[in-house]
Image (cartoon, helix red, strand yellow):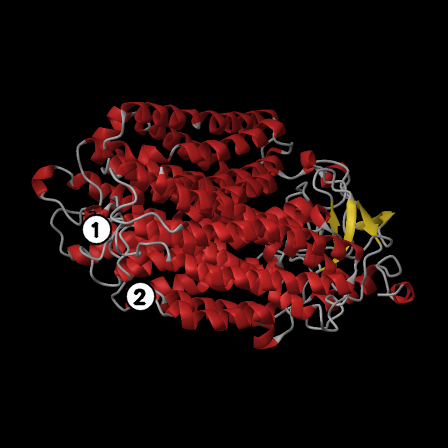
């Protein structure tokens, strides 16, 4: 573009107020109609879809849990057959881990991180749209297979040799393995987007030590995703190859080794726990600061803890394999590292307690869920330290003790913060407040229901009840505790029904939220609720870690960006100094078409290796369509 | 909220090179995760190597010439690759076009050579776990190579159209950057596939 042409371009310092807003809105908004919906690259639109879809899978996974609890409520019940039960616990675990917990955290990041760092869209918005479609198609693939009675039945970790062709000659394990590929592609894409958004799209002045803690948490999580997920992709691919073209990775008669599967799986599987938990801590830090009415104490300690947790999480995977006959030195090392990771988590807990102690806490629903989190997660952490020890682990391995432990860690560590986050950010996303009265009911039902459901499982495990059994006999003496647990599960499920009711009612008639209903300090509250398509009329300038507490009446901003095309500000990595006015992509149908082509390729390739041949050209065509400049202003700069 | 304009960024450029630009970091991210994929596959290879009393299992080591020839070409390809990089920074369209054509041809040549390498592995994927992991690793790198070559060819064509605007030079430098990674990723795999079975 010539200098003369550049001079003619209208910039945001030449317009003000409503005129500026309207102009930016017309440039950034998602086109209306079905085609508009399918082409949207707005991080808020994609993020909202991601959140809703992930919660839909939570609902499905939760229903399965209830079915299991009905079956186990008494001895020798015939509500579910052994075969159905296998499918159901596999679907429950796979859905919760791959279709709910990881995606929902990334979904919140997709929605919130660009707003919190003060930019207009996520980095690589088309990749973001592609990621959502892959996630959706992968989830539907799993559930449609389940409905057609080809759902997986080999556990959420699909151990070989059970999942090998010899022992499971149906397509069930392939469906599981390829669902993994779908969701990992989706997760990896979001991880790269978040890293680049945090590194390069922060508002000017948002130096590394002014990044909100939730954004830090999502940055660390994204790195975990990038380094953990390739392992499960190698694992799932090699499993499919073993089953489809007779490779011998896991065939011990031809030099393969079943334990290789466990290493590959858990090298991903353990960081996975932290991929779910670290975003939860970020939510806790955000909510806590707002409702304790002071910044979180020990900001650098919390960040260093997150980073330390991230690193340590890659050194623990073998503690899932203590009963596989490890060398003693290995067992000792992994016991030590498993106990070590309690230290950074503990440091964060103390920072949060100190913040509550020193603050003037306002006990609204989000804070209640945070306190519930602290209680439940600490209990889960303690049983974690117990099972880090080889003798205890050997005793309770594959019993309900472990089931209790990881539900305390995952529901306590991630779901409670998440529900708190729903109450906290719902006003920003929808413009309306959730009902506080229903919120309190929601919290207490969840807290009581959860503990009644899962605490007895500790005892059941200690008295010998193994995991994954579809029933038990009356003489085992497990009936009362199981009935109690099932009752708790129903109460816990009711708490989610209440949440759903609250969401539907509040969407219709909730109190209007305004820009910053909680008087919070971070940038997402500096724009309207819900935010306009451009997020901010002008890009904010950050001078403080809590910009809105420094000054909540006026916002320092930069000017000079185009109001004729989508433009964002790229800043330097450490100091967030403005560097480039970069174009941001317009809506496009190609990410959807690419996702469809990729899905055909993925699903085809569990049936025939030739899918690699006929599946590649459509992918190549759609990718070229995606990257080929459309001739718009954005592209021809 | 009231806006107070404290700074004007109108004079900033609309694209940049290297770590200043977003796509460079995106490429970096994908290199990190693909590099991790290779690391995991190497780990799996070494695990199988460690648990098996004999290696390679029931096969001769791969013939050396295809892999070695590839390695030489990979290393030499860095020269035209860097020349393309410099031309892109100078925004010299003619030289960039030449450089991209050369790089596309090198890539296609390497893909052909890769076919020979598969044929000279001296094992099939279904022979043993050794054959499986060798085919997996070579397959992974071939996917990696083919993707990059496809990308380079498309970019080459693009630079001959009206879309060859200044910002595309930044894309060219990112493509160059990515090729360096393709080369770098190959070197440990060459040692692993061709020399470890000879230990």
Q: Could you tell me residue B23's position as x and y percent?
A: 66, 54
Q: Quadrant of residue A390?
A: top left
Seen in the image, is A386 located left or right of residue A125?
left
Q: Which residue is mark 1?
A: A162
The residue sitting at 9% across, 44% down in the picture is A473
Between A2 and A569, the residue placed more toward the observer is: A2
Q: Quadrant of residue A21?
A: bottom right
The residue sitting at 81% across, 57% down in the picture is A561
Farthest residue toward the left? A475
Seen in the image, is A396 located left or right of residue A112?
left
Number of dots carrying numbers = 2
The residue sitting at 61% across, 53% down in the picture is B77
Residue A299 in view of the camera:
yes
Between A460 and A629, the residue placed more toward the observer is: A629
Between A236 and A101, the residue placed more toward the observer is: A236
Q: Which residue is mark 2?
A: A145
Q: Could you tell me residue A283's position as x and y percent?
A: 54, 41
Residue A126 in view of the camera:
no
Q: Could you tell me residue A104's position as x and y percent?
A: 48, 52
Q: Is residue B159 above or below residue B59?
A: below
């Amino acid at each position: 573009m010539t200098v003369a042409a550049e001079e003619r371009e209208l910039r945001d310092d030449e317009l003000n107020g409503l005129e500026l807003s309207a102009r930016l809105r017309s440039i950034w908004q998602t086109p209306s109609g079905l085609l508009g919906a399918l082409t949207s690259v707005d991080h808020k639109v994609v993020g909202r879809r991601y959140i809703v879809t992930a919660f839909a899978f939570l609902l499905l996974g939760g229903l399965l849990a209830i079915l299991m609890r009905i079956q186990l409520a008494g001895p020798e019940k015939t509500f579910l057959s052994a075969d159905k039960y296998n499918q159901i616990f596999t679907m429950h675990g796979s859905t919760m881990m791959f279709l709910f917990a990881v995606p929902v955290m990334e979904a919140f990041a997709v929605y919130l991180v660009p707003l919190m760092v003060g930019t207009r869209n996520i980095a690589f918005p088309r990749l973001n749209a592609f990621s959502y479609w892959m996630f959706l198609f992968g989830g539907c693939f799993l559930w449609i297979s389940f409905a057609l009675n080809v759902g997986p039945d080999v556990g959420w970790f699909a151990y070989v040799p059970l999942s090998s062709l010899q022992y499971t000659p149906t397509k069930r394990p392939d469906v599981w393995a390829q669902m993994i590929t779908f969701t990992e592609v989706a997760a990896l894409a979001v991880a790269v987007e978040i890293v680049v958004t945090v590194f390069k799209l922060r508002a000017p002045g948002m130096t590394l030590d002014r990044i909100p803690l939730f954004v830090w948490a999502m940055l660390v999580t994204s790195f975990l995703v990038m380094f953990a997920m390739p392992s499960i992709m190698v694992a799932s691919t090699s499993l499919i190859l073993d089953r489809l073209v007779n490779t011998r990775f896991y065939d011990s008669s031809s030099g393969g080794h079943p334990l290789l599967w466990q290493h590959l799986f858990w090298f991903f599987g353990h960081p996975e726990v932290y991929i779910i938990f670290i975003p939860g801590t970020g939510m806790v830090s955000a909510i806590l600061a707002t409702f304790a009415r002071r910044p979180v104490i020990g900001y650098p300690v919390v960040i260093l803890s997150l980073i330390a947790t991230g690193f340590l999480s890659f050194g623990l995977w073998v503690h899932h394999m203590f009963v596989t006959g490890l060398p003693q030195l290995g067992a000792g090392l992994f016991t030590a590292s498993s106990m070590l990771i309690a230290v950074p988590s503990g440091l964060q807990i103390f920072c949060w307690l100190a913040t509550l102690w020193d603050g003037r806490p306002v006990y609204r629903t989000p804070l209640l869920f945070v306190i519930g989190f602290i209680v439940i997660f600490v209990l889960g952490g303690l049983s974690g330290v117990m099972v880090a020890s080889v003798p205890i682990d050997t005793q309770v391995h594959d019993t309900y003790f472990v089931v209790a432990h990881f539900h305390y860690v995952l529901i306590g560590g991630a779901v409670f913060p998440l529900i708190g986050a729903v109450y906290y950010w719902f006003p920003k996303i929808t413009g309306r407040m959730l009902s506080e009265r229903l919120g309190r009911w929601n919290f207490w039902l969840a807290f009581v229901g959860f503990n009644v459901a899962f605490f007895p499982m500790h005892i059941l495990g200690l008295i010998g009840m193994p995991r994954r059994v579809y029933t038990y006999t009356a003489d085992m003496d497990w009936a009362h505790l199981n009935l109690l647990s099932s009752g708790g599960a129903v109460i816990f499920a009711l708490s989610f029904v209440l949440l759903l009711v609250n969401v539907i009612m509040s969407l219709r008639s909730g109190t209007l939220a305004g820009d910053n209903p909680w008087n919070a300090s971070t940038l997402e509250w500096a724009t309207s609720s819900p935010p306009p398509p451009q997020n901010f009329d002008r890009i904010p300038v950050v001078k403080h870690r809590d910009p809105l507490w420094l000054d909540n009446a006026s916002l320092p901003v930069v000017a000079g960006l185009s109001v004729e095309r989508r433009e964002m500000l790229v800043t330097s990595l450490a100091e967030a100094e403005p560097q480039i006015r970069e174009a941001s992509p317009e809506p496009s149908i190609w990410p959807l078409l690419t996702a469809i082509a990729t899905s055909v390729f993925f699903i085809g390739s569990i049936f025939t290796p030739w899918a690699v041949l006929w599946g590649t050209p459509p992918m190549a065509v759609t990718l070229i369509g995606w990257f080929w400049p459309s001739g718009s202003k954005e592209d021809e700069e | 909220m009231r806006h107070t304009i404290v700074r004007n960024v109108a004079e900033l450029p609309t694209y940049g090179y290297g770590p200043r630009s977003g796509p460079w970091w995106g490429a970096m991210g994908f290199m990190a995760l693909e590099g991790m994929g290779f690391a995991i596959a190497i780990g799996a290879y070494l695990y199988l190597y460690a648990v098996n009393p004999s290696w390679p299992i029931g096969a001769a080591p791969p013939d050396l010439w295809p892999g070695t020839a590839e390695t030489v070409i990979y290393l030499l390809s860095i020269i035209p690759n860097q020349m393309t990089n410099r031309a892109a920074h100078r925004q010299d369209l003619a030289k960039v076009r030449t450089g991209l054509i050369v790089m596309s041809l090198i890539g296609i040549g390497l893909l052909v050579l890769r076919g020979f390498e598969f044929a000279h592995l001296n094992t099939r994927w279904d022979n043993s776990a050794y054959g499986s992991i060798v085919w997996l690793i070579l397959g992974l790198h071939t996917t990696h190579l083919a993707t990059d070559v496809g990308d380079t060819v498309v970019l080459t064509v693009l630079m001959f159209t009206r879309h060859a605007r200044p910002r595309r030079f930044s894309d060219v430098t990112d493509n160059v950057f990515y090729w360096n990674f393709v080369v770098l990723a190959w070197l440990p795999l060459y040692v692993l596939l061709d020399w470890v079975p000879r230990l």
